[in-house]
């Protein structure tokens, strides 16, 4: 992880970068992404990325649970 939390937030605020699904996925999966930012970006992810998070054992546990719930159609709390 070469990104600092400040760099992650700068990327997350850039509309050009946020149109790229892979960038969004990588920011969500980055351990240095602040929790609130990761949750916001997670809500913007496409179905393919959500499924990838759900099936990746190394995904952050909270996001993995959210991904599984989203795939199953269970509303978030």
Image (cartoon, rainbow, N blue to C red):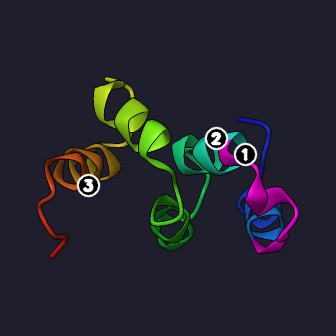
Q: Which residue is mark 2?
A: 26
Please determine whether, in this image, residue 58 is positioned above or below residue 32: above
Q: Residue at x 29, y 48 (%)?
A: 67
Query: x%, y% of residue 65?
Result: 21, 48
Residue 29 appears left or right of 32: left
Please determine whether, in this image, residue 5 is positioned above or below residue 59: below
Element at label 2: helix
Q: Mark 3 to mark 1: distance in Å?
A: 19 Å
Magenta segment: does it hold 10?
no
Residue 64 appears left or right of 58: left
CA neighbours of label 2 inside 10 A, class few (<14), some (14 to 19), many (20+)? few
Determine contact: label 2, label 1, CB under 8 Å: yes
Q: Which residue is mark 1?
A: 23
Question: In the rendered image, which quarter is residue 7 located in?
Answer: bottom right
Element at label 3: helix
Q: Which residue is mark 3?
A: 66
CA neighbours of label 3 inside 10 A, class few (<14), some (14 to 19), many (20+)? many
Please determine whether, in this image, residue 48 is positioned above or below residue 45: above
Question: In the rendered image, which quarter is residue 33 located in?
Answer: bottom right
Q: Nearer the viewer, residue 72 or 14?
A: 72
Q: Residue at x 21, y 44 (%)?
A: 68
Determine contact: label 3, label 1, CB under 8 Å: no
Q: Mark 2 to mark 3: distance in Å?
A: 16 Å
The stretch in magenta equals 13-21
Query: x%, y% of residue 59?
Result: 39, 35
Query: x%, y% of residue 53?
Result: 39, 36
Residue 16 appears left or right of 43: right
Q: Mark 2 to mark 1: distance in Å?
A: 5 Å
Element at label 1: helix
Q: Nearer the viewer, residue 61 or 69?
A: 69
Query: x%, y% of residue 1?
Result: 70, 35
């Amino acid at each position: 992880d070469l990104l600092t939390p400040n760099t992650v937030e700068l990327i997350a605020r850039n509309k050009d970068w946020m149109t790229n699904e892979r960038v969004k996925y990588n920011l969500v999966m980055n351990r240095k992404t602040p929790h609130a930012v990761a949750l916001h970006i997670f809500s913007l992810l496409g179905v393919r990325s959500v499924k990838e998070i759900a099936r990746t054992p190394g995904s952050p546990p909270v996001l993995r649970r959210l991904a599984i719930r989203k795939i199953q159609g269970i509303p978030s709390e």
